[in-house]
Image (cartoon, rainbow, N blue to C red):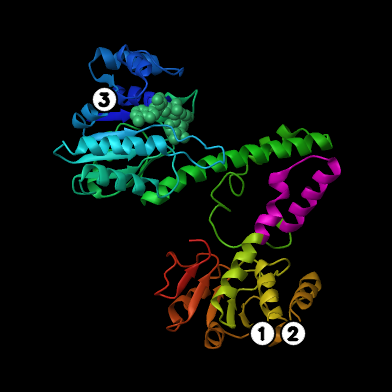
């Protein structure tokens, strides 16, 4: 395939090297004449193991060239990969000047081009950027999206220092295409890459890149805070974390990574608080760990705010315990939501087949009687009874029987799902609202 690559920095140079290595023909484009000259000589403008050999072979095999002329590069290629910089502004916002400047250059070139052209944005950008890029191309070219050209989000996952092996064996190839023709072109382009090819919604692909990078940053910060706490306590943090990573059930796993309701129960809040307090005693700053309770509280408040904004006073709650198949209500976040609603004069009806007041004992019983006085007057015997006397019904844990509420809700009644029991997105017309999807 004949492609043009805009931006010959780390990502663009490595992409040019690897894609010519796969047999594609690449035209590199950069505004910097020195970088263009360097690529034309088969020399790498960036220091990266393995890149120079691939560039030399590409130039020798006449599959790699470079230019400062975007117009010619677009006319001679079927697909343009945008790898220009997206630096931070001083206020932290993303500077998209380079991306949109290339969009205008491609648009002007497309005026003179017949045939479908694909524009894939490899730079890291926030959701909505690819759509803005498409508009800019339409405005400058007079051409129509998905008729004369298509766009895609196509984030890059390489790391400097191991960029060539990362390019060849990424965790996945992500494409958020504007239509199926775009997807087909990119599928063919990346066919030699040994990784699952995943096609997804354009904005989801853009956000995925941030989910990955921010999670990596979170991992580093968490590990370092654990290290600092360990050192303060005279514990070797490597002894701890070497075993920590062996837990592939709860630690290094998909578990706990699906957006849903706040954490609760008798362990997580208590243990987060205890370790946060310990950091204060040690005089060790651990802002990630110390902000976890605040983050969790904000999530509970999101539910309360959403309900208060609706202005409906009759609220049904399905699930009282902090997770399904248990009657443990200690620090259950939904109990805090109920408490707040009752305090504001809301009428709350509750159903949870695992919560039987006559069987509750000990700390669990004391907790719920203290948090929700007269709780028995709010408890109902079935989902149907809750549905009958509420305008909004909350699904607060993953008990399978709560699916009934999704089917049995009457017109005008809203089901507010805190745990994504239904595999659907929020849909106002269908009376379904998800907490964060
Ligand atoms: N560096 C990495 O490891 C890495 C990894 C994954 C994703 N990313 C993302 O990829 C993007 C590029 O990163 P980078 O480190 O390669 O950037 P870079 O700053 O090294 O390179 C950008 C290049 O674009 C060129 N350029 C600017 N305007 C241009 C134009 N109008 N036409 C042609 N070329 C133009 C610049 O001269 C420069 O050579 C960023 O969004 C970055 O966040 C980077």
Q: Report the image quarter containing ligand 1.
A: top left
Magenta highlight range: 269-297
Judge whether 365 appears above or below 266 on screen: below
In the rendered image, the quadrant that contains the N terminus is: top left
Q: Which mark is residue 69?
A: 3
Give SS at disc 1.
loop
Question: What secondary structure do most residues of the magenta stretch adopt?
Answer: helix
In the drawing, does residue 20 fall left or right of residue 220? Answer: left
Q: Which mark is residue 374?
A: 2
Which of these two is toward me, 341 or 142?
142
Which of these two is toward me, 261 or 403?
261
* Residue contact between numbered discs 2 and 1, judged by CB atoms under 8 Å: yes
Q: Residue furthest right?
A: 281
Query: Is residue 283 part of the magenta span, yes or no?
Result: yes
Which of these two is toward me, 287 or 223?
287
Mark 1–mark 3 distance (CA, rounded to whole Å) = 72 Å
Picture coordinates of residue 270, whole percent (x, y): 76, 57
Cβ(mark 1) to ligand 1 < 8 Å?
no
């Amino acid at each position: 395939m004949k492609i043009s690559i805009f931006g010959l920095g780390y990502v663009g140079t490595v992409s040019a090297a690897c894609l010519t290595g796969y047999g594609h023909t690449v035209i590199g484009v950069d505004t910097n004449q020195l970088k263009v000259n360097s690529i034309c000589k088969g020399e790498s403008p960036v220091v990266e193991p393995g890149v120079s050999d691939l560039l030399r072979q590409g130039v020798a095999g006449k599959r790699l060239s470079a230019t400062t002329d975007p117009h010619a590069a677009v006319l001679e290629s079927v697909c343009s990969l945008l790898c220009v910089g997206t630096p931070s502004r001083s206020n932290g916002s993303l500077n998209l000047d380079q991306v949109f400047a290339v969009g205008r250059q491609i648009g002007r070139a497309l005026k003179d081009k017949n045939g479908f052209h694909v524009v894939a944005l490899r730079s890291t950008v926030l959701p909505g950027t690819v759509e803005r890029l498409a508009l800019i191309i339409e405005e400058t070219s007079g051409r129509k999206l998905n008729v004369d050209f298509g766009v895609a989000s196509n984030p890059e996952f390489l790391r400097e220092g191991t960029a060539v092996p990362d390019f060849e064996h990424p965790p996945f190839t992500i494409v958020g295409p504007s239509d199926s023709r775009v997807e087909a072109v990119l599928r063919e382009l990346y066919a030699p890459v040994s990784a699952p090819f995943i096609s997804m919604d354009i904005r989801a692909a853009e956000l995925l890149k941030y989910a990955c990078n921010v999670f990596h940053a979170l991992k580093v910060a968490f590990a370092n805070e654990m290290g600092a706490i360990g050192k303060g306590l005279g514990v070797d943090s490597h002894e701890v974390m070497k075993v920590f990573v062996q837990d592939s059930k709860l630690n290094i796993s998909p578990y706990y990574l699906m957006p849903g309701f706040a954490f609760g129960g008798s362990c997580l809040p208590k243990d987060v608080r205890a370790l946060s307090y310990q950091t204060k005693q040690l005089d060790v700053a651990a802002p990630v760990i110390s902000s976890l309770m605040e983050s969790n509280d904000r999530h509970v408040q999101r539910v309360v705010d959403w309900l208060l904004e609706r202005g409906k006073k009759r609220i049904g709650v399905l699930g009282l315990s902090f997770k399904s198949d248990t009657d443990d209500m200690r620090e259950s976040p939904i109990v805090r939501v109920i408490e707040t609603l009752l305090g504001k004069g809301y009428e709350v009806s509750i159903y949870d087949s695992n919560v039987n007041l006559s069987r509750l004992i000990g700390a669990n019983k004391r907790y719920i009687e203290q948090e929700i006085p007269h709780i028995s007057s709010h408890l109902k015997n079935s989902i149907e009874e809750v549905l009958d006397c509420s305008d909004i019904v909350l699904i607060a844990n993953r008990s399978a029987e709560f699916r009934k509420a999704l089917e049995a809700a009457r017109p005008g009644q809203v089901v507010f799902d805190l745990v994504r029991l239904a595999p659907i997105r929020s849909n106002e017309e269908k009376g379904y609202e998800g907490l964060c999807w």
